[in-house]
Every structure is written in structure tokens, then in C-alpha cells.
Image (tube, rainbow, N blue to C red):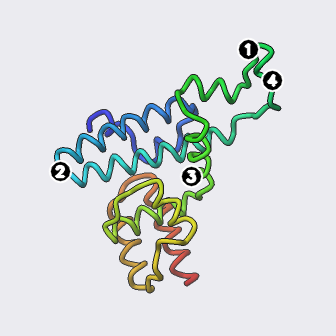
């Protein structure tokens, strides 16, 4: 986990290059497999969180990549900038579409997913994150449950740059419910 430990959620959010986000995702995926095989579920879950955050960030960067009109590929070797980016980073078009779906999830929803998944002891997956964002997997929790989730997550991130933002988001949510 030493290679993965170099990255925090705040650092992943600051990545400006798709290839860097893909690199972090690959490291996190490998770490998740390794720790799962070692029955270190806590470390595996952390690696999966970093993997999802990296995919989310890569999706944001892919959405920001200028798209060009399609060109005929049967009469030359012209390739769009977007297609070249996918090819250079080894991302399939379907993976790119999935990551762009992840990018549509707000930071607040992302943080709520990790908090609720930790509280309910869910395994972090891209599928469960997308379902959570669509409101399909979370049962209605009462005010006390959300307060416990918010407090636990804020305690976990205490001292990090994200802690203050998460606390404010949790307080806004609790105030509005």
C-alpha cells in the first residue's frame, strides 16, 4: 500500500491528466486484489475507494476533453484527439463512457456514498456507487443514522483538507432534513 498511500482523496481530485488518473486507478486495483487475497478487508476497501475516486476524476477529465466531429476511418489514418487519448491511456470506449457516468456524480454524493457504504459495511464497487447515486440502493435512514454517518466520516477524515467540506455538507444535509 506504500505506492497507493502517496495519494489522498484531495490529491486525486487535483489530478489534471487522464493518464495520471489511470495510473492511480491501476495501482489501486492491484492493491485491492492483493489485500483482498491477504484477507485485509480494510486495506482492500481503502484501495477500492481510491480506485473509484480515480475513475471519477478520469471521467471528469474525459468529459472536459474537446470532442471533434467523427471522421471517416476507412480513407486514412485520421484519429480524433479523444480517440488518441483513449488509445494512449489504454482505456476502451465503454470504460470511458462508464467513467463519464461516474463523473456525473457530485462530490457530495460521492462522499455520502462512501460514508453510507462504510456505515452499512458495503463493499465499494462502481455498480453500487452508480445505483446509490440513482437512489436505488439506499433505504431511508432516519436523522440519527445520518448524524452517526456524518460524525464517523468526519472523524475518519479529521485533519484532512476534505474534512471541513464534508462536515459542512453533512450539516447542510442534516439541517435540510
Distance in Å between CA atoms under marks 3 and 2: 28 Å
Give the crowd class for mark 2: few <14, some 14-19, many >=20 residues within 10 Å: few
Instruction: Write down the residue under mark 3.
Output: 102
* Coordinates of residue 100 in the picture (x, y in percent): 61, 47
Query: Which element carries disc 4, helix, strand or loop?
Result: loop
Identify the disc placed on residue 72.
4
Q: How many other residues sit within 10 Å of disc 1, few (<14), some (14-19) or many (≥20)?
A: few
Picture coordinates of residue 146, whole percent (x, y): 43, 78
Residue at (44% x, 82% y) in the render:
141
The N terminus sits in image quarter: top left
Identity of the residue drawn at 47% across and 57% down: 127
SS type, badge 1 = loop
Q: Distance between the residues labelled 3 and 4?
A: 30 Å
Per the image, the residue denoted by label 2 is 39
Label 2: state its secondary structure: loop
Residue labelled with disc 1: 77
The residue shown at (51%, 61%) is 165
Amino acid at each position: 500500500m506504500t505506492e497507493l498511500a502517496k495519494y489522498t482523496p484531495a490529491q486525486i481530485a487535483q489530478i489534471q491528466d487522464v493518464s495520471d488518473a489511470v495510473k492511480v486507478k491501476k495501482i489501486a486495483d492491484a492493491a485491492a486484489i492483493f489485500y483482498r487475497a491477504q484477507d485485509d478487508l480494510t486495506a482492500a476497501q481503502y484501495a477500492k475507494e481510491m480506485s473509484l475516486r480515480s475513475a471519477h476524476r478520469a471521467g471528469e477529465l474525459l468529459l472536459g476533453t474537446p470532442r471533434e466531429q467523427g471522421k471517416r476511418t476507412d480513407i486514412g489514418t485520421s484519429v480524433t484527439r479523444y480517440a488518441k487519448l483513449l488509445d494512449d491511456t489504454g482505456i476502451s470506449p465503454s470504460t470511458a463512457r462508464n467513467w463519464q457516468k461516474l463523473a456525473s456524480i457530485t462530490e457530495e454524493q460521492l462522499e455520502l456514498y462512501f460514508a453510507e457504504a462504510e456505515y452499512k459495511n458495503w463493499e465499494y464497487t462502481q455498480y453500487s456507487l452508480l445505483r446509490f447515486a440513482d437512489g436505488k440502493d439506499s433505504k431511508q435512514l432516519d436523522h440519527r443514522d445520518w448524524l452517526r454517518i456524518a460524525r464517523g466520516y468526519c472523524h475518519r477524515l479529521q485533519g484532512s483538507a476534505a474534512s471541513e467540506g464534508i462536515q459542512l455538507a453533512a450539516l447542510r444535509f442534516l439541517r435540510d432534513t
